[in-house]
Image (spheres, rainbow, N blue to C red):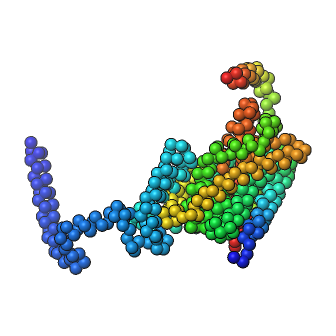
Amino acid sequence: MKNIVIKLLASLMLFAFAFSANAAASEHATTEQQVSSTHKEENYQSKPFSEMITGFLESTGIVALVNPREDEMSATGQPMSDFHKGLGRVIMILVTFLLFWLAIAKGFEPLLLLPIAFGGLLANIPVAGIAGDHGFLGVIYQMGLSNEMFPIIIFMGVGAMTDFGPLLSNPKTALLGGAAQFGIFGTLVGAVALSQASLVDFTLQQASAISIIGGADGPTSIFIATKLAPELLGAIAVASYSYMAMVPIIQPPIMKALTSEAERKIKMSTLRHVSRLEKLIFPILVLVLAILVLPESTPLIGAFMFGNFLKESGVVERLNDTLQNALINITTIFLGLGVGSKLAADQFLVPETMFIMVLGIVAFSVGTAAGVLMAKIMNLFPGHKINPLIGSAGVSAVPMAARVSNKVGMEYDRTNMLLMHAMGPNVAGVIGSAVAAGVLISLFQ
Amino acid sequence: METNLVIEGVKFMFLGMGTVFAFLIIMILFMNLMSYVIHKFFPEPQPSADMQQAGAQKDNKKIIAAITAAIAHHRQG
């Protein structure tokens, strides 16, 4: 009982003390408030309530879409047409909904398509200016895309995921990965031909950036696009990733059209065992060759081989794990959002986008056909026969293209496992498109 | 338009495809050279399986039988 009384007294005293302190503080605060309120009144004019309501209503998104403001500028600070401020944005928001559907319901490269599409949705919000210089998408773009940082980091992760074993055990299949790069350069000629025919106005830089879609390699496309034609980045990235997702639809008809039944049933000799030392030396070997032959390609090849070297070294499991998982995932989020910021209506809803989409699918198809034909040419020479179906895997798109080769092969002979054979040209295709990218960069230096 | 863009594009194509193939052919040559050197001078230590082999023989036969059965089943299905 005594205890309780003491406690009660003590708490009362504490309370009284706190209250007095509080009162003193609030006295102090009221004087300050008076000062600041007189200060504020200079800027803030009292308005009638009705005016406040109309003022608020004028700032809503609906009004901004229906009746765009005169002074609103695009993310790059250019004046925009009323179409791009109003209806264009609505169309683009619907386009991003379509991309959501493709990614979620159809499983089209959801890891990249979802962040890109959501970035596109945010970039098309009127007034907020999220894709502008001070919006967060704009900041992400400045942080890692305009300086080509994110694609390089992705390349490191892809390198850490790549196994060069199948290529090392059958080196000549690398030629298939080279042939498929014809998709890039063939499309380049196509794009400049369109431009020459005055159908569309592409500069040589823009045509090169578009044609790299044929390399079927997302990070490479983004790397080249930001370097040579940043204004086309949105369309190029969307085309590149959506066609990569459509590889299982695009490739099989071309592969079947160019091969005979007997060729599709060719069985390839089993791959030899590759020693650990070979796998360890290979990334350094390729990098040294790149340094000697084409230094312009070393940002991409260097990052790729760095990732692969860490993996094959076998002594930095933690770094390897981070590259393959945490780092590439974080970068993918930022890369997607940054690319999405280029889906703003004023940059995407232009006639060029349609041509980019068409040229992109042409590039993919030509690359596939060139790989298959190259395999048929190689079969004319003596040596182990190559199943032409693995030629299509020369367009990078790791590992989707190799799986497609395997699947088509199994349709004709269920015991014919082509997957590992197709991985050879597949990873060679990545090196091939990095070299092709290096050539294009060096031409514009 | 003074310069013919198509001709420029064709030039790009020959240069680009030439470089890609040159790079890959050099890479293939070096890969073959590398595997030759490594197999000649640094052969991988073969796992000394002689001791285990006798014991493993029976198991191996069982495994082969299981695989054969699985393949036969797969072909039927």
Tell me residue A55's x, y (percent). Answer: 26, 68
Residue found 14% across the figure and 57% down from its top? A14
Horizontally, residue A328 falls left or right of residue A23, namely right
Tell me residue B66's x, y (percent). Answer: 71, 21
A362 vs A215, nearest the viewer: A362
Residue found 19% across the figure and 74% down from its top? A46
Horizontally, residue A333 falls left or right of residue A212, namely left
Corner quadrant of residue A185: bottom right
Residue found 73% across the figure and 75% down from its top? B3
Corner quadrant of residue A43: bottom left
A283 vs A6, nearest the viewer: A283
Tell me residue B61's x, y (percent). Answer: 76, 21
Tell me residue A329's x, y (percent). Answer: 54, 52
Which of the image's four quarters has the C terminus of chain A?
bottom right
Residue at the farthest right position: A382
Q: Would you place residue A441 above or below residue A213 in this image?
A: below
Count of numbered marks:
0
Q: Would you place residue A225 above or below residue B58 in this image?
A: below
**Does residue A140 appear in this view?**
no
**Does residue A97 appear in this view?**
yes
Corner quadrant of residue A220: bottom right
Residue found 46% across the figure and 62% down from its top? A88
Which of the image's four quarters has the N terminus of chain A?
top left
A293 vs A415, nearest the viewer: A415
